[in-house]
Amino acid sequence: MAYSIAIDGPAGAGKSTIAKLLAEKLGYIYVDTGAMYRAMAVYFSQNHVNPEDEREINAAVINVDITIEYMDGAQQVILNGDNVTKLLRTEETGKMASKTSKYGAVRSKLVDLQRKLAKTTDVIMDGRDIGTTVLPDAFAKIYLTASSDARAQRRYDELVAKGQECDYQVIKEDIESRDYEDMHREISPLKQAEDAVLVDTSDMNIEQVVSAIEKIIEEKKAVL
Ligand code: DC
């Protein structure tokens, strides 16, 4: 049986950084489900699909084929035969993904792919609905969060370090509006699964978060 660990939480809580480090330590495969919603968004943008029109979205989803490959341990997202991994992290793609991830046709296609991946391999999967919907029987479930101030500050520091001009208040408002959209959509909204352990990283560094989650996993294993 394959083991799975679900890490859910709002944007900017550090899910992917933490999940990647844990996957390396534990020898699991890291599955970034946000990247799949972003790849779908790339298709919609490239094909001028109106994100407000569900009928257009439903028709477009039929033409989308997304698969996952690993290159030196790093997840690659293949969209209709093209590796689009490098296109996924832009602001525009993030906004399109946020608008289109609420649709049933988008979600069911990606949830199927995510479940298939977890069936055969030990995975650490991060997203918004992993513990609640995708892998309700996951071996361990973590709800990773942080205050919107802490998340905005981290994002601000990241952009400043890259030499980009940015406005703290705009970043914070963007984070809060994404939280609202993720938490209030009809299908699989972001919420803590009943059996998930809450880890608030507002006042923790990366090493502290990784060791807190390792401890949670060890405690789970101890009662197996
Ligand atoms: O985690 P991220 O920023 O890469 O996610 C991009 C978008 O996809 C985000 O707006 C929320 C959505 N998403 C989702 O609805 N369900 C998931 N399991 C993962 C991401």
Image (tube, rainbow, N blue to C red):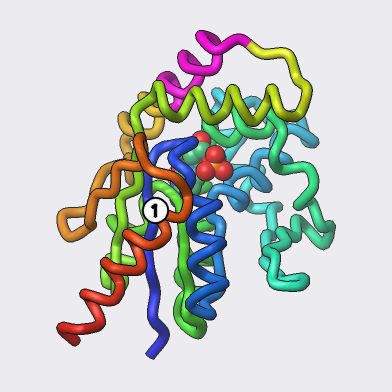
Q: Is residue 171 magenta?
A: yes
Three-letter code, disc 1: Gln
Q: Quarter-wise, where is residue 186 in the image?
A: top left
Q: Quarter-wise, where is residue 182 in the image?
A: top left
Identify which residue, 201 or 192, lies in the foreground: 201
Location of residue 41 in the rendering, given as x and y in whole percent from the top left corner? 65, 39
**Main SS category, magenta section:** helix
Callout 1: 10 Å neighbours few (<14), some, many (20+)? Answer: few
Identify which residue, 87 or 22, lies in the foreground: 22
Q: Is residue 170 left or right of residue 49?
A: left
Q: Is residue 161 left or right of residue 81?
A: left
Location of residue 9 in the rendering, given as x and y in whole percent from the top left corner? 37, 44
> At numbered mark 1, what does the secondary structure look like: helix, strand or loop?
helix
Magenta stretch in the rendered image: 167-178
Q: Is residue 102 visible?
A: no
Give me the residue at 81% from left, 57% from top.
Answer: 83
Location of residue 3 in the rendering, given as x and y in whole percent from the top left corner? 38, 81
- Which residue is the site of mark 1? 208
Location of residue 31 in the rendering, given as x and y in whole percent from the top left corner? 55, 63
Q: Quadrant of the N terminus?
A: bottom left
Give me the residue at 27% from left, 43% from top.
Answer: 191
Give me the residue at 39% from left, 24% from top.
Answer: 148
Identify which residue, 194 or 158, lies in the foreground: 158
Q: Is residue 185 above or below residue 107?
A: above
